[in-house]
Amino acid sequence: SQIFGVKNIGIFMGIGNESFASQITISTVSSRPLGISIADFNNGRMLDFVIVNYGTHSISVVYGYGSGRYSNPIIYFTGYDSFPVTLAIGDFNKGSYLDIAVELYVASAVPRYTIWKQQ
């Protein structure tokens, strides 16, 4: 089941011996995040993540800086009434950078997909 009204993403950093540090919270305002994928999008040797924002018809990319520090979310709108629901990560165009594919649920049409590729 989906939980609506969520406004944060929580991250628990591993500290060894099978335990985790206290939760780091990243605000997504009122975007209703449905999913998250993790990868090194900018080849910075740190894990970054992308969030599917159902409530604001967008995705957010957040870059990791290490030591539990992250960039502010960079928001990409998926279109009016597009309702993004899932995403996939890969080098779809063989451009040596990771790309993002987003499944969009459109109430009046067949589901469609959008792909963002890095330049």
Image (cartoon, rainbow, N blue to C red):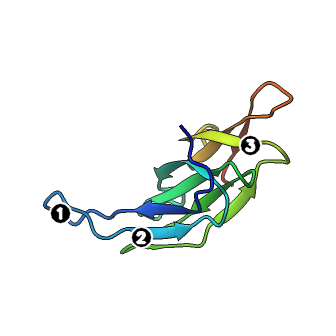
Q: Nearer the viewer, mark 3 or mark 1?
A: 3
On screen, residue 28 versus residue 18, left or right, reads: right
Q: CA distance from mark 2 to mark 3?
A: 27 Å
State whether residue 106 is above or below residue 64. above
Residue 16 badge: 1
Q: Nearer the viewer, mark 2 or mark 1?
A: 2
**Which residue is at 41% across, 62% downward?**
11
Numbered disc 3: secondary structure? loop
Label tally: 3
Q: Which residue is mark 3?
A: 83
Asked if marks 2 and 1 touch (Cβ < 8 Å), the reply is no
Percent position (x, y) of residue 95? 61, 45
Q: Identify residue type, mark 3.
A: Phe
Percent position (x, y) of residue 87? 60, 40
Percent position (x, y) of residue 80? 85, 48
**Which residue is at 60% across, 59% downward?**
61
State whether residue 73 is above or below residue 111. below
Percent position (x, y) of residue 113? 72, 34
How many neighbours does mark 1 have within 10 angstroms: few (below 14), some (14-19), or many (20 or more)? few
Q: Identify residue type, mark 2.
A: Ile
Give the mark nearest the N terminus, 2 or 3: 2
Camera-side residue of 81 and 64: 81
Give the mark nearest the N terminus, 3 or 1: 1
Residue 24 badge: 2
